[in-house]
Every structure is written in structure tokens, then in C-alpha cells.
Image (cartoon, grey):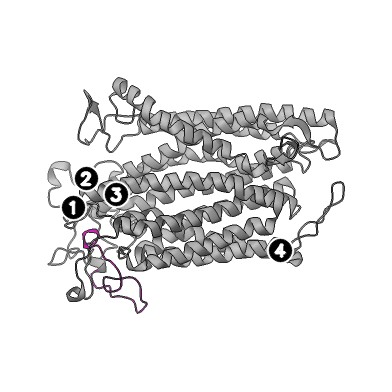
Amino acid sequence: MEDKKNNKSSSLAFPSPENGMYDEEKQSSVSDSPAKTSRRKPGGWRAMPYVLGNETFERLASIGLLANFMQFLLTVFHMDQVSASNVLNIWSGVANFIPLLGAYISDAHIGRFWTIAFASVFEMLGMLTFTLIPWLPQLHPPTCNVGQQCKGPNKAQMGFLAMGLGFLSIGSGGIRPCSIPFGVDQFDSTTDEGRKGIASFFNWYYTSFTVVLIISLTLVVYIQDSVSWVIGFGIPTVLMFLSLILFFIGMKVYVYVKPEGSIFSSIIQVFVATHKKRKLKLPDERESNGIFYDPPIPEGSIVKKLPLTNEYRSLNKAAIVMEDDVNTDGTRSNKWRLCSIQQIEEVKCLLKIIPVWATGIICFTAMAQQGTFTMSQALKMDRHLGPKFQIPAGTLSVISMITVGIWLPIYDRLIVPSMRKITKIEGGITLLQRIGIGMVFSILSMVVAGLIEKVRRNSAIMNNSPDGIAPITVMWLAPQLILMGFAEAFNIIGQIEFYNKEFPENMSSVANSLFSCTVAVASYLSSLLVNILHTTTGGHGHPDWLTKDINAGRVENYYYVIAGLGVLNLFYFTYVARRYQYKTRLVVDDGIKSDVHELHDMKY
């Protein structure tokens, strides 16, 4: 890019061709010292023990710390379920919005390696903070027995908790948007071997992620619940420390991709340039030759050139070439006044996807209940397996993960090939159809959750035990969690694939950030619903639906509200999906995959 050609290396010793591997095929910029740069092969699988090892330990640490967080707030900090749910949802929202900032800092300033490195330090500090909270009596409320009036946290204790969550948010903001791209950077995507390596990396990444989830939701949660919160938080902290060491050990092996500017800057430039040229008249299509700024894609770039379209046509004004807009060498004189057709079409891709993105918020709101009110239900049910072993409440969400793990191979190996023969579509069904099926499962999960909660509460009231526990097994919650597992298998994976296929190649950070933003907005919506229902329901001597005593409340009505919103959202999604035009889609004809075509007439 012309606006970065004069960038010089920072005095900081960031990875460079001189102190680490530098893959020239991945760069359109050149080293400041070309003479000193020797061509070296990408890190490839030599870097994977360090990259995947770091990722595995980091995820095991962060998930192990937070898998049982709702119960920690309820039992150690003595919060009511509404306050605990608010803390969890607000923190989740912040942690999922910050990756946007992390992606910008990485792409525009310091690169992926140092973004992950600095973020890992903050993550380590956050985990250390959470290990100290249950360890030191001054940092948490005093313990209390059943039947006693429990004292809640004071301002200093809440402040220390907020500091720990802040550290973790900064950590996730740097690690989440950079971890997968940094792993992909280690392979040369211009070769068959490199592309196979990338595909294999994704398989190993998600396999290790599933294994980590199961370990975190079983072993680590059991230690926290049955042995000690200090040890249960201390183990993830030690693992995070090992992750940090392992990450730095691989420094001499990694490929370092230089930051070339953030796509977010390019998006803003399009809107600014459009505003400045808003009074210009767009030419007719037959007169548009040479009027629009359309430089070639840099040689070696993986980005495919996008043609000019008439969608959101007013944005095309940003590419109209006026006097003195272009220098003699073909570069722009002012990047905030003139944009290329490629930039404009990338922004159009974003605008086209936003209505689909918005439909995922309600679905994620349903999924978010697994870590809040589902856990509150579990704590008031019989969790015993045999006379001695008790299932930790935080472990129950592993049922959803097991459902996903069992279903995906069946879906991929049996159902997709069968559907492919009928529909002639590479994925068996379209990505939007897959997302829509996930929404249906999320609605069913909320309806079933409401029905089961009514049974649980009636049982608890009839039993009238001092601890309020219903004499029914916690496995009654399995149906709603299994249905939610199907929702995740269809909706979440469908969304990830949809964003990555429909965005241009250089907008992968935006694709990943959009997914995080969905989770963030869903967390805030969940918190908003909880507070509205907490303050508006009840009265006339009756407690509100989400009162502190779950047996006195009506949590099932909360689930039904989410299910109702899900039905309305499904109608909106159907309307949007039927009008969506795919960028590309693989079609199978007589068992042979065709090339990727522009299929603007193929919808939902």
C-alpha cells in the first residue's frame, strides 16, 4: 500500500527478517534492509509444537478458570443469581468486544506475535489475581453455613475481582483475534504442501480445543468444586505460565508477518471519501471506463480482485478519480479522499453481511444461559453419582460438547454426502440453511429448559428440604443441553464458515471479530433481559421471576421469553436469508466439484 511505503522499523526489537523467519510470499511490503534478508522457509510444522502447545495450555488455563465462574460468584462471593449473571454477562461482553481493538493493534502496529505475547502476560496477571482471591481471606467475603445470612463482597473485594476480570479481558483481546492467523502464518499458502498444512492445522486446533474443553469442564471444575478453589485456580495459572514460556521458546522458528495496516482503517476511509464526494454524480455504466480508481492487486497477494457492483451504489463515489487525486506513479495523493474499487467492494461485503450477523444475537443469548441459570438449576438438584461422587454443576455443559463431538463426524461423513447427491451443493445444504437449523434447535432447547425447570421447582417445593434441593437427578437437564449442542453444531460452526467464505481473504480478522461481537451483544442482551424481568415481574406479595431463591421464582418464564424472541428472530432471519446473494459457492455435478463461480442468483 502506498500509504505505508515509508514506514520504518520501530526501535523496539520486534520480530523481523533479521531476528526471525520472514515469509516474503505473505508480504507486499519489503524489509528495511533487503540486503540482509535471506530467503528462509516458513516455520511450518517445526513451529507447531510451540504454537499448538501455547494454544492448548492457554485455553486450558482460561477455560479452566472460568468454566465454574458462576458457581464461584454464588458460593464464594455470596452473590444472588441476578448479580452473578450480570457480572458474568458484562464481563463476557467486554471480553468479546476487545478483540476488535486487538485485531487493529496487531494488523496496524505491532504484528501478531507481539500482540499475543503482551496479551499473554495480562492473561497471566488475571489468573494470578483469581488465584489470590480465594487464597487470601481479605479478598473474599467470610464463609457461611446453610441457613445463615451470608455476607456479600465489599467494595474493595469487588474492585479486586474487577481488576482480575480486566486483566483477563485484555488478554483475550490480544489472543483471540491473533491465535489462528498466527498459526496459519507458519505455512506457505502458495504451495500445495502449505495449503495441506493449513487444513491440518485447523483440524489439530479444533481437536485440541475440544479435548481442552472436556478436561476443563470435568477435571479442573471437579477440583474447584470438591477439593479447593485455590488449587482449582492455581492449576490454570501454572498452565498459563508454561504456555507463556513455550511460546517464547519457539521465537527462532516462527514466521513473522509484518503489520501492513488494519482493514478497519480502510473501511473508515471509504465512508470518509464517500462523504467528501457525496455531491458528485455517478456516471452511467457505459461511461464508467477509467473514471474509477482501480489499481491492480499487488503481486503475490492471496486476495482475489472484486469487480465493481451496483449494491450500495452511493459508495462508488469514493472511487471516482478527480483532478490531483492520483500521483504520477499511480498512487493516491490522499487516501481519505480517493479509495479503490477493491476497498469499496470490501465494505459492501461487510454491509451485506450485517443483517445476517444480527440474527445470531438471539441464538447466542439462548446459548449463554448454559453458564448462568442452567448452573443455578443444577445447584438445586441431586448431583450424586453413587453414594460419594457428586457431579460439579459447572461440568454439565460438557454434555453440549459431547453432543457436538459425536454429531459432527456423523454429519460430515454420512449426512453431507447423502444431501450433496440431492442438492448438488458442496456442503449438502447452504450455510444460511445450516445457521437457520441451529436457531430452531436453540428455540427448542429454551422450551424444554422451561418445562424441566417447572418440574424441578415443583419437586423442590414438595420436598421442602432446608437446602432447597429437589430430589430429582441433575441429568434431567441433559435434554436441554443436548438440544443446545445441536444448536451450536449447526449455528456456531455455520456462522464461522459463512463469515470466512463471504468476506474477502484480507478481511479474516473482521470475520473473526464479527463472531466475537455476536457473543458480546448477546451477553449484554441477556443482562438487559435479566434486569428488566427482575425489576418488572412479581409484586402483590409475589417474588419476581428471577429472585435470589430460585425455588420461589419463575425461571421457566425467562426461558419462554427467550424462546419467544427466538421465534420472532427466526422469521426475521428467513426474510433476510431469502434475499441474501452468496459471493461464491461450490457446486457438485456428477460427483465432481466445479470451480468456484459467482452465483449471485443462488439464494438461501
**For numbered disc 4, what is the local secondary structure?**
helix
Q: CA distance from mark 4 to mark 3?
A: 44 Å
- Is-magenta flag for residue 281? no
Q: Which numbered tag is attached to residue 197?
A: 3
- Disc number lying in front (3 or 1): 3
Residue 29, above or below 188 = below
Figure quadrant of residue 104: bottom left
Q: Amino acid at mark 4?
A: Trp
Magenta stretch, overall SS: loop
- Earlier sequence position, callout 3 versus callout 2: 3
If you read the primary sequence from the N terminus, does the residue marked by circle 2 or circle 4 appear first? 4
Determine the CA span between mark 3 and mark 2. 34 Å
Mark 3 surroundings within 10 Å by alpha-carbon count, few (fewer than 14), some (14 through 19), many (20 or more): some
- Range of residues picked out in magenta: 5-28
How far apart, in angstroms, are the residues tagged by discs 2 and 1? 9 Å
Q: Which residue is mark 2?
A: 308
Is residue 579 shown above or below 241? above
Foreground of the two, 112 or 535: 112
Q: Secondary structure at mark 1?
A: loop
**Disc assigned to residue 135:** 4
Question: Which amino acid, mark 2?
Answer: Leu
395 vs 173, left or right, is: right
